[in-house]
Structures are given as structure tokens and as C-alpha cells.
Image (cartoon, helix red, strand yellow):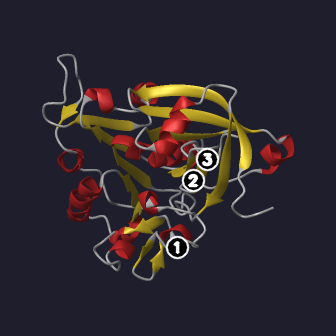
């Protein structure tokens, strides 16, 4: 089988997260492949629509939940438009999993702080559920999530579920001007809310994903709070192309993100050229 040949998947469920963001639940058509398929949180895949092309996203569901995978995406081009047109029961392709992963085992026994912005919650969601499905292995769990407006918040049902859990501290925020009259969350940019929440860095790890500008201004806040660079993790999955290190389009200096990443520590980011 060619390394470029996708596995056949069937769309098993569709959730419209926002007017332009959709989540697909996918199941393998081959029962034997479905039985043996496994992945680690943070890994990504290539999702293809026949005749429209393929696009790269993280696997947004956790490996602790078997029998399906999920991806979340915004409609922004030919391939994602093709994905958007799919209906339950339709077939599509999937290649993967590729890349490294978030070291959730390394994080056991300590606190975890999750920070996400916009659709950047998708890869973080996989880690969150991985942790919550094995909740006894971790201490305090803090989730800080923001979007431009209340309408841009994704996974609203899960945000509501997390807000009701006594073992999770959830901070939600929208950019100034993005709130509605009934909004009960924070108003402000994510870096400011991280500083306001002030999670303890003692025996803690942080996982962050979102727009590059959000990450740029959040990393110094985490440093100020005492988080060491080697305990702060992010993903550069937005750099992914072929997923196999063949096309060379994901390289940053000498690093091939699809082979060496997509998960990197803040310490590793400091050694990359500024183009990342």
C-alpha cells in the first residue's frame, strides 16, 4: 500500500460548532483497521475529499475513546469546502497518525494548565479529555479559553460540561467588544486572563495552542508566573503539509515539523528561526 494512499472512512456524525466551524466524527470502513488503530494525543492526520484534495488537522478526539476519530475545521478553501459538503454516511479518506505527541505520561502527578484560543482548542481538547478520562493521575486542572466573540467559541457543550465539574477550573473569555448582554465570562485577551487566573507553576505543565499572536504574548506571561520553558508545550500543526517529510514545506530551518513535531516545548521554539 502506498504511503500516500488514504484509508476509507465514513462520516458517522456532524456537529456545527460555529457558523464556519464543523466537527466530523469518522469511523473506519475496515473493521480490522478500526480494531487496531491507535494514536497519541497531539498527533495529526491528512483528511481527504475525493476530487477536492486533502488538508491537515490534529485528531481532535482523545485516544482514550475508541471506535472513532474526530476532526474540527474551518471552511477556508477547496478541500475544507469539500469536507463541509459531506453528509452522514459519506465516504472520505484519512492518512495518519503522524508526528509526535503531548507527553501526558510525563505530566502525571502534577497540575496541568490548558490555554487555547479560537479553533486552537481542537488539539488541546484531545489532551483535555485524555487527562479527564484518567483524572486520578493528575492534580489541579485549569482551562483558559478565549475567542474573538461569543459566537466564535467552539465545543460549547463541552465548555458547559467542564464548567460544571468540581475538579476543573474553567476561565472563558472573549475579546473586548465580542461579548453579548448575557455573557457571564471574562472580557479580555487570553494573555491578560492567564495573568489574572495566575495558575501555580509548582509541579505544573502548560499546554497552549491558538493564533500565533496569542502564543507570542502568552509565553512571557507563563514565564513571569514561573513556568519553565521545558514544561510549556505547544503544537505547530498549522505548518503541516504532506505529513511525511517529503515535500519540505513544513521545514523551519533544519527542523521538519511533521517529523520532529508538531509538538514542541517553549525551549525548543527559542532555538527555531523566527519564521515559525
**Would you name the residue on which mark 1 appears?**
260
Say whether residue 125 is visible: no
Q: Mark 3 points at which residue?
A: 48
What's the distance in space between the residues labelled 3 and 1, CA to CA? 23 Å
Q: Residue lying furthest right in this view?
A: 32
Above or below, comparing residue 112 to residue 274 in the picture = above
Q: Which residue is drawn at 54% across and 71% down?
A: 247
| 224 left or right of 114 in image | left
Residue density around tag 1, few if under 14, some if 14–19, many if 20 or more, within 10 Å = few
Foreground mark, 2 or 1, reads 1
- Which residue bears the numbered disc 2? 41
Q: Are marks 3 and 2 in contact (CB under 8 Å)?
A: no
Is 155 situated left or right of 151 in this image?
right
Real-space Cα distance between discs 3 and 2? 21 Å
Q: Residue 179 location in percent, x, y?
A: 19, 26
- Residue at the image position 47 percent from the left and 40 percent from the top: 73
Q: Is mark 1 on a helix, strand or loop?
A: helix
Amino acid at each position: 500500500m502506498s504511503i500516500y494512499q488514504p484509508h476509507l472512512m465514513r462520516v458517522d456524525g456532524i456537529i456545527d460548532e460555529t457558523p464556519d466551524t464543523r466537527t466530523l466524527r469518522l469511523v473506519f470502513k475496515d473493521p480490522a483497521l478500526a480494531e487496531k488503530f491507535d494514536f497519541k494525543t497531539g498527533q495529526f492526520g491528512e483528511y481527504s475529499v475525493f476530487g477536492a484534495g486533502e488538508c491537515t488537522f490534529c485528531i481532535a478526539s482523545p485516544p482514550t475513546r475508541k471506535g472513532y476519530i474526530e476532526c474540527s475545521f474551518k471552511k477556508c478553501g477547496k478541500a475544507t469546502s469539500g469536507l463541509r459538503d459531506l453528509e452522514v454516511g459519506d465516504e472520505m479518506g484519512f492518512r495518519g497518525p503522524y508526528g509526535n505527541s503531548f507527553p501526558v505520561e510525563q505530566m502525571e502527578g502534577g497540575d496541568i494548565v490548558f490555554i487555547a484560543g479560537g479553533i486552537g482548542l481542537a488539539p488541546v481538547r484531545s489532551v483535555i479529555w485524555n487527562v479527564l478520562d484518567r483524572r486520578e493521575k493528575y492534580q489541579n486542572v485549569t482551562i483558559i479559553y478565549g475567542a474573538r466573540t461569543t459566537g466564535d467559541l467552539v465545543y460549547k457543550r463541552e465548555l458547559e460540561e467542564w464548567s460544571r465539574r468540581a475538579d476543573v477550573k474553567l476561565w472563558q473569555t472573549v475579546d473586548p467588544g465580542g461579548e453579548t448582554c448575557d455573557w457571564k465570562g471574562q472580557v479580555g485577551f487570553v494573555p491578560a486572563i492567564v495573568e489574572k487566573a495566575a495558575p501555580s507553576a509548582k509541579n505544573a505543565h502548560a499546554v497552549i495552542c491558538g493564533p500565533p499572536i496569542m502564543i507570542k504574548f502568552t509565553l512571557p506571561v507563563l514565564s513571569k508566573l514561573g513556568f519553565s520553558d521545558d514544561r510549556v508545550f505547544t503544537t505547530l500543526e498549522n505548518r503541516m503539509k504532506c505529513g511525511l517529510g517529503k515535500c519540505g514545506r513544513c521545514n523551519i530551518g533544519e527542523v521538519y515539523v511533521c517529523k520532529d513535531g508538531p509538538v514542541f516545548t517553549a525551549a525548543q521554539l527559542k532555538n527555531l528561526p523566527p519564521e515559525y
